[in-house]
Image (tube, rainbow, N blue to C red):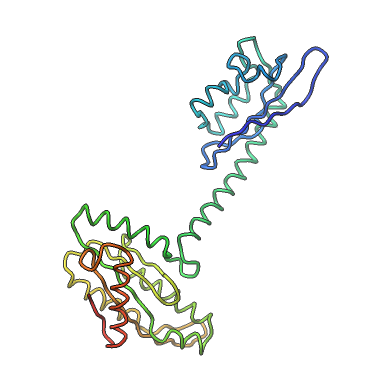
Amino acid sequence: MSWIEEQHLSSSNRHQRWWLGLSIALLSGLVIFVSTIVAVTGQPMAALLTVCSMVLIGISFVLYRRLHLARLQREEVLALLSRKQWPTCEGLCHLESSLAKCAARRIQVLQAEIADLQDREQRLKVQAHHDGLTGLANRFLLTDRFQFTVERAKRSGQSFALLMVDLNDFKAINDHHGHVAGDEVLVVTAQRLSSAVRASDTVARIGGDEFVLIIESIEDPQEMLHIGEKLFDMLTDPITLNTGVVAKLGASIGLALYPDDGASLNDLLNVADQAMYECKSTGSMSLQ
């Protein structure tokens, strides 16, 4: 994204002087420098748009537009600004040192502002893709990770598993000990689930006390029974809260396999959800 801001800064008896501020805004952070001032002497404003009449930091505006040449680093910009004269087809154009210093200061300020914008953008990106309480992937990121896992499974020919986890008696924690205690349980549960799987796997919180896991590269469906048992033992281990209260919870886990149980995220979620509720009714983990 780029734009040109015209500035008429001064005039003298001998020459009409126009100052053009070059504003280049690439929010990707490649380069940003606003109001880098180039002095052009004795030219009407209409002539400033021609290749021969004007050079912006050694690069004609026309060439800049055509080549999208905007990848200068701050050090390169400052080096260019330190030059005293700029060649044009009509002769030399003088750039006063005070203007160069002013432009350099603007670059420094803008760098700080852009760094802040990039930090905000990164925070917004994290917020858009992760659960605010636990830091796990949210449903949006789960969908993205699922598609990525499907593509990798197609290339490798291997299966993967989707697990749905629900905490039994979680409502009782909220009712008897408050929502702060409930949040603490959710955070500890998220940490336990994340520690139980590989970095390449996905753990997501899709709402309330419901979690979804994607376990990649399953060679034998029977190994999921062992993983499920490991998760069950981990999740039913009592949690000592900051208040000293010991929260004892159960867990229901439903499993579904790709591609045996479906090819889409909704298909696998439905199968795992049904298996999870069968688990609740029987008190044991179920696999479909």
Q: Residue at x 19, y 71 (%)?
A: 223
**Is residue 86 left or right of 212 when viewed as pictured?**
right
**Is residue 235 left or right of 72 when viewed as pictured?**
left
Q: Residue at x 57, y 46 (%)?
A: 115
Image quarter (top left, top right, bottom left or bottom right) of the N terminus: top right
Q: Residue most toward the top? A: 90
| Camera-side residue of 287 and 268 | 268
72 vs 160: above or below: above
| Camera-side residue of 152 and 76 | 152
81 vs 113: above or below: above
- The percent coordinates of residue 204 (x first, y second) are 39, 67
| Camera-side residue of 184 and 155 | 155
134 vs 89: above or below: below
**Is residue 261 left or right of 143 when viewed as pictured?**
left
Say which quarter of the image contains residue 5: top right
Q: Residue at x 22, y 63 (%)?
A: 259
- The percent coordinates of residue 60 (x first, y second) are 57, 20
**Is residue 41 left or right of 271 when viewed as pictured?**
right
Say which quarter of the image contains residue 222: bottom left
- The percent coordinates of residue 217 (x first, y second) are 22, 61
Image quarter (top left, top right, bottom left or bottom right) of the C terminus: bottom left
Q: Residue at x 55, y 51 (%)?
A: 119
